[in-house]
């Protein structure tokens, strides 16, 4: 390869990492904006205070179902039509849904539009991580996904800041960010690995391949289970701040938006730390073991913080956020476990199935809460999810430095 070609590849790779990072920025912005404006937006459209928790969880559940279905849709299309087409299609649908979200006046319409936004958003992260993983060298792709994590997760900070100017404007800004990202993506290039199989007759994007082979299915299931504790921490322990604040006899008013802001800034830092740890130790699995263990410790500290002040709450959110900062590392693991012909399907569906797992997690938590209360239920759910995650990591093969240019047999 000539120096000119090498420099061009380097420039293209840097631009691709930037585009994937900003895609994740928008991804996190949208995922968290409802959690931040949940209370105010529902009150403004006429929901009674006594119904805020149930109506809010219902809307979150519909958004997560959209992510789950969208993950399958965009994942399959990413393997059949290309990673770039998914990045264009998903951000367009997301942007239109967010503009529409700014005009809702009832919880039913709110839920429908959040469902559509979830479908649109589902393609962002998986397609971005797949492109980065297939474009950078096998020794350096971990650094690429680490940068995606660091830049993307600051979307939480943007969501919290923008939400202070009004929840409807926050959704309009989200739609505008999507349009800007759509324009930025003009000129991005397709994965070379995908180009090599594009015209072949090999089965591409066959979602059912993940279920027709027991060994492949187990790998897929384990990849999903290792990410579940993260979404439990964010989607339940932090976002249900008003209810946990009461159960922990918190002193002063706790702000869920600020808690999410602190948590996601810390997740960004944790994402860099997890990525560096996996690169320096040359082991994705070791990084996962360390951070899953830390996440258990952080949740125990949080649930024992009886009488915490508002400032202590924010630092506890940051501590938990750092300890679950393995999000892009776990998605990288999933992408590295499977061949090029279903890699986009896996990398896109796995994170969205994890996000979708918040639906059964919410239902299980509410069921436990009725019998054991908020705090004990918090311990039980974290114990179950962490045991499953640690076991799943133990069953997966180490993938650091693995050559990704291969295919999955039918």
Image (cartoon, rainbow, N blue to C red):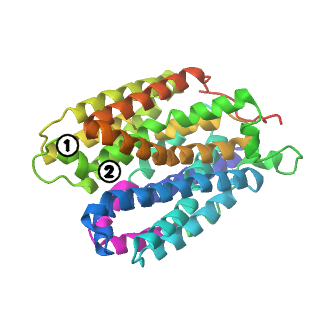
Residue 69 appears at what percent x and percent y? 61, 55
Which percent across, then down, holds residue 127? 62, 51
- Name the chief secondary structure element in magenta: helix
| Rendering coords of residue 250 (x, y %) | 14, 45
The C terminus is located in which quarter? top right
| Mark 2 crowd level (few <14, some 14–19, many ≥20, 10 Å Cα) | many
For residue 364: magenta?
no
**Residue 158 part of the magenta segment:** yes
- The image shows residue 148 at horizontal and vertical percentages of 49, 47
Q: Residue at x 36, y 55 (%)?
A: 156
Q: Which residue is mark 1?
A: 247
Q: Quadrant of the N terminus?
A: top right
Left or right: 275 with respect to 200?
A: left
Q: Residues within 10 Å of mark 1 (few under 14, many from 20)?
A: some
Magenta region: 155-180
- On the question of residue 47 being in view, the answer is yes
Q: Residue furthest front?
A: 371
Residue at (47%, 38%) from the top-left corner? 228
The residue drawn where x is 43% and y is 29% is 384
Residue nearest the observer in this picture, 344 or 167: 167
Residue under the point 26% across and 36% down: 375
Of mark 1 and mark 2, the one earlier in the sequence is 2
Q: Image quarter for residue 56?
A: bottom left
Q: Secondary structure at mark 1?
A: helix
* Tag 2 residue: 239
């Amino acid at each position: 390869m000539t120096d000119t070609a090498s420099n061009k590849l380097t420039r293209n790779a840097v631009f691709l990492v930037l585009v994937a990072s900003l895609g994740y920025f928008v991804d996190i912005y949208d995922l968290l904006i409802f959690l931040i404006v949940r209370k105010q937006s529902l009150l403004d459209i006429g929901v009674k205070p006594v119904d805020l928790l149930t109506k809010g969880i219902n809307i979150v559940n519909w958004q997560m179902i959209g992510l789950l279905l969208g993950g399958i849709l965009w994942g399959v299309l990413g393997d059949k039509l290309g990673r770039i087409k998914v990045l264009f299609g998903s951000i367009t649908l997301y942007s239109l849904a967010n503009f529409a979200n700014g005009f809702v006046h009832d919880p039913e319409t709110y839920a429908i539009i959040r469902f559509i936004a979830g479908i649109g958003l589902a393609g962002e992260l998986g397609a971005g991580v797949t492109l980065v993983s297939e474009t950078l060298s096998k020794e350096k792709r971990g650094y690429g996904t680490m940068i995606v994590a660091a830049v993307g997760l600051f979307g939480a900070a943007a969501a919290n800041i923008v939400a202070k100017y009004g929840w409807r404007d926050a959704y309009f800004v989200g739609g505008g960010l999507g349009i800007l990202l759509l324009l930025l993506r003009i000129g991005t290039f397709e994965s070379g690995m995908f180009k090599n199989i594009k015209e072949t007759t090999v089965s591409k994007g066959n979602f059912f391949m993940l279920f027709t082979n027991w060994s492949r299915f187990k790998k897929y299931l384990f990849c999903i289970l290792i990410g579940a504790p993260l979404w439990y921490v964010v989607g339940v322990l932090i976002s249900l701040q008003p209810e946990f604040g009461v159960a922990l006899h918190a002193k002063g008013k706790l702000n869920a938006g600020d808690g999410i802001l602190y948590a996601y800034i810390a997740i960004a830092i944790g994402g860099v730390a997890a990525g560096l740890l996996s690169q320096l130790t040359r082991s994705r699995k070791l990084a996962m073991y360390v951070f899953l263990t830390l996440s258990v410790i952080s949740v125990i500290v949080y649930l024992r913080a009886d009488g915490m002040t508002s400032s202590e709450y924010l630092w506890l959110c940051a501590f938990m956020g750092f300890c679950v900062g393995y999000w892009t590392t776990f998605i990288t693991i999933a992408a590295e476990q499977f061949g090029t012909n279903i890699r986009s399907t896996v990398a896109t569906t796995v994170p969205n199935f994890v996000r979708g797992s918040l639906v059964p997690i919410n239902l299980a938590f509410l069921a436990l809460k009725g019998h054991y209360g908020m705090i004990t239920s918090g311990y039980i759910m974290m114990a179950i999810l962490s045991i499953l995650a640690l076991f799943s990591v133990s069953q997966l093969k180490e993938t650091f430095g693995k050559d990704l240019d291969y295919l999955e047999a039918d």
